[in-house]
Amino acid sequence: MPTDQPVLSENAKLLAEALTHKVQRNDINVPLLPEVANKVITLSQDPESDSIQLAKLIQSDPSLAAHVMRIANSAAYSPNASMVSLQQAITRLGMNLICDISVAASISTKMFKAPGFEDHIVYTWKHALVTALWSKEIARKCRLNVEATFLCGLLHSIGRPVALQAALEISKINGQTFSQEELLAVEETVHIDVGTCVLNKWGMPMIICESMQYFNDYNNAPHAKEQTSIINAGAKFATHTLQPEILSQSQLTEADVLGDLNLYQDEVLDLIDKRDDVMSTMEAMSN
């Protein structure tokens, strides 16, 4: 089920090839993952970790700690009570959720430098965040493990802004000028390969890498077919949520991936009814 690739001009093809060669040489300029985010992800994968370790780790970055507490106390997570400490927030909301909030708060669109594409990068990141939130809802509906789902959804399109950044660097070095449409077509062509390079340099777990690599071909994912199909479905829900003019509700409900996940029509409609909750959570995590 691979999707059709965009049509590239001859110059754009050469740019895409140059980007592919940089990926093959492991020569992509990858933004550094914030240290605390990296440690939080590692901690979330460790079954021996505990809430005290997580609280101490987040508190080592006062700005992040304040951000996490603000989100934890938002109406999306704590409509009827105010939490006064990270330990209390972790106890009430759970380690996995606090890890998700911490990583989402740590990674910012400011990490990417692609002049002229700021709005596109903001939308890409918002779409990734909404994909992550929808993917957790879908995993719950399918009665599947949701622990790594948020991170898989959040990072499934991380290659897009990095690909744009690299494309602009190459075109500047070569003294070339491309239209926005050409550069976005190049991004679409190479972002999965670029994203795989990013996730490998960040040392992400296999399940996150595979969710990206096989995003458009989840049936062939060697180890994480269910997880990858959930992320694919989450991305479709995100597109419908943010741009219903591009993917209508009827088109969404007919998506093959929902049938592949054995979701019945009434279950899909139940999920769609959670749109306001997802948007409320997204707004809390974006501000």
Image (tube, helix red, strand yellow):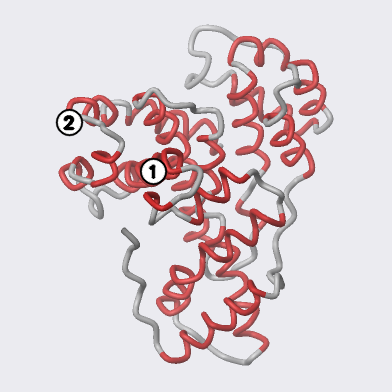
User: Which one is in front, 7 or 177?
Assistant: 7
Question: Considering the numbered disc 1 on the image, is that residue within a helix, a strand or a loop?
Answer: helix
What's the residue at 31%, 36% (across, down)? 261
Give above or below for 106 relative to 29: above
| Left or right: residue 29 compared with residue 109 | right
Would you name the residue on which mark 2 appears?
Answer: 265
User: Which one is in front, 172 or 132?
Assistant: 132
What's the residue at 43%, 79% (across, down)? 182
Mark 2 and mark 1 lie on one chain; the one further toward the N terminus is: 1
Which residue extends farthest front?
A: 222
Q: Position of residue 150 (x, y in %)?
A: 52, 35
**Tag of residue 264:** none
Amino acid type at image mark 1:
Ser
User: Which one is in front, 265 or 80?
Assistant: 265
Q: Position of residue 51 (x, y in %)?
A: 73, 16
Looking at the image, how many numbered discs can be counted on the residues?
Answer: 2
- Separation of residues labelled 2 and 1 (CA atoms): 17 Å
What's the residue at 65%, 37% (across, down)? 103
Give above or below for 35 relative to 199: above
User: Which one is in front, 79 or 102?
Assistant: 102
Amino acid type at image mark 2:
Gln
Q: Position of residue 76 (x, y in %)?
A: 48, 22
| Left or right: residue 108 compared with residue 64 | left
Give above or below for 96 relative to 187: above
Question: Considering the numbered disc 2 on the image, is that residue within a helix, a strand or a loop?
Answer: helix
Tell me the crowding category of disc 1: few under 14, some 14 to 19, or many 20 or more residues within 10 angstroms, Cα based.
many
Would you name the residue on which mark 1 appears?
Answer: 229
